[in-house]
Amino acid sequence: MKRRDIILAAAGTGLSCGLGTEERRVRMDKSPKANVAVLKASSYEAELLGLLEEGMKAAWPEAENSVRDKTVLLKPNLVEFDSHTCINTDPRLVLACRELFLKLGAKAVWIGEGPGHRRDTWDLADQAGYRKIFSDFDDRFVDLNLDDVSKVRAYDNSMDLYLPKSILNADLVVSVAKMKTHHWAAATLSMKNFFGIVPGSIYGWPKNLLHYQGIDRSIVELNRLIRHSFAIVDGIVAMEGNGPIQGTPVQAGVVVMGRDVAAVDSTCARLMKLDPLKIKYLKDVSMLGIDGLGSIEEADIEQRGEMISELARPFLVLDDFAGMRLS
Amino acid sequence: MANPQVRLHFLRSNRNEDGGWGYFPGRESRVEPTSYVLRALGEQDSAWKQGIEYLKARQDKSGGLTPGAEIPGPTWVTMLAFPLLKQAGIGSKQLESASDWILNSEGAEGGIMQRLLYAMGKSKVDQDPKLKGWPWRPANNSWIEPTAHGLMSLHWMSGIAPEAGIRYRREMATQMVLDRRCEDGGWNYGNKKVLNEVLPAFPETTALALLGLARSGLDLSVSLSKARQEYATTKGAYGRALLCLALRSHGEKVVYEPEHTDLHPSKNFMLASLEALAMRGGHEAFLP
């Protein structure tokens, strides 16, 4: 029996390994649909703050009450930099995200990232334009690779992880991800973006442990552990083809937001004309039946903002993932 | 040549009570930044002895060192700290167990399937799985940075470990590093090609690989040329300082002028240490 079969069987019987009491109780209830906002954004020169405010009203109407006086950490994608393509979350969108959460009353908004391939995080932030656009970057950035860590108990059949205290102590962690294809996992969106919170000082560069445990499994585990999360995906200029590093920029013109990171990612997949039900980590997390995490069926998502059908466009993918294309 | 005193003062005035240093001021001590700071301060410094005590206390029963007091399990930091422990002349039993740990630690690649796929040309990554260096953590693959420190640590093992064992690991790891070299002559973290796409080198890993290959007697002119080119163009302080030390370890005369006269804004102890080393010579802190 393969691991996936075990998860499927466990989910079916309500005995999914490692779920806490609360999760078990909640699974028996009928959860409301997950709100996901799809926003049209033609360029980074657009009025992004206003756009995000609209999106927040649609995706998380209670945000103001939930965020006021809280500490928020924005986690962009800064895995590497290459001036010829679009690996990173655009800093102009991250800046607008910071303004959004400050406007919602957040006590502090930090930016944190632990690049997966490079050790010189400050150089990377320089090259990607972050230090230029954030005048207080040096005082507001946490290198998650080198942060103090605390042990987090893993779910059964897995290993405990040491994660950055800045992530664990934040009241809200916002995955400000880039919409990209991925050569191992089909697509990297808000859930996969959490690989960057795993500290290199403990697990190395690259974060090989996550590959050893299985990429899909690690994506699911991290997102089960980091539940105080919100997702904003930068698809204004996205990446297709051989992502996440060597793909080609594509003008997708979209930003996607929501509290259920799996619902956000499955919506992104549909915008990329990929079938989210065929992306293994999305399928796996949906089977766990965790309240607030794992709505990937269209029927379980309250789609707000723009119609997917009007913004969707087929992303080029590697041959291995051709079977995932939506017709 | 720029004055390293600002950086050295920064290091001295931010030592933790346990004798070690974190990555940044006020953070928990770890073996990695402590090892860099001690190299920068040198054994004549008043902070040296307590720093060595901090490192000694991280050695567990296996002989390897753990990354920090609250983080169990020995890792690659054993290779980074070993030269300092040797230099400090700690007990021979502790040194022998550390060198045993290093000599017995190797990458987990090389399974039958991996070898078969590689032999058939169907491997997704272009890495010869027979060639093993050192992993970041036990039971993981070999990567460039831990392997570079593994190679450097071997230089400090004479008289502690059997020469045959040292020679075997040096030859194997040297081949592994050469196998992972990028087409541009430098190194990244350890993948030169994935899914037939050529990947570029990074400044910091190119420097570390060259430090690891110092005194190998190999013709590394292509890689040294790449390092010179990176040193002239890269703006990142971490990569520049390491490249300066690496080029010097291959006999090149390089002057290091930091971008910031004062401390780098990251206030990172490792970077301050590397810059202090680069300002005053410094590559001998890695090699005996």
Image: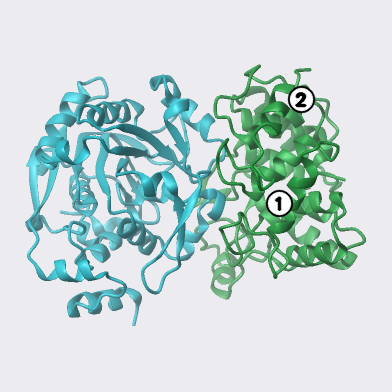
Residue holding disc 1? B54
Screen quadrant of the C terminus of chain B: top right
Give the answer, above or below, for where B55 lies relative to A140: below
Which chain gets the cyan colouring? Answer: A
Q: Where is residue A146 in the image (x, y as percent from the top left)?
A: 53, 43
Q: Which colour scheme is used?
A: by chain
**Nearest the eye: B242 or B144:** B242
Q: Position of residue A177 (x, y in %)?
A: 32, 41
Q: Quadrant of the N terminus of chain B?
A: top right
Q: Mark 2 points at which residue?
A: B279
Along the polypeptide, which appears first: circle 2 or circle 1?
Answer: 1
Amino acid carrying label 2: it is: Met
Question: Residue under mark 1: which chain is it in?
Answer: B
Which residue is located at x 70 percent, y 70 percent? B61
Dot 1 lies on which element? helix
In terms of image quadrants, where is residue B253?
A: top right
- The residue marked by circle 2 belongs to what chain? B
- 2 vs 1, front mark: 1
Q: Which secondary structure, mark 2?
A: helix
A236 or A153: nearer the eye?
Answer: A153
Q: Is residue A91 above or below residue B180?
A: above
Which of the 4 image quadrants contains residue A85?
top left
Q: How many neighbours does mark 1 have within 10 angstroms: few (below 14), some (14-19), or many (20 or more)?
A: many
Q: Chain B is drawn in which colour?
A: green
- Amino acid type at circle 1 is Tyr
Say if residue A287 shows up in the picture. no
Numbered badge on residue A136: none
Image quarter of residue B65 = bottom right
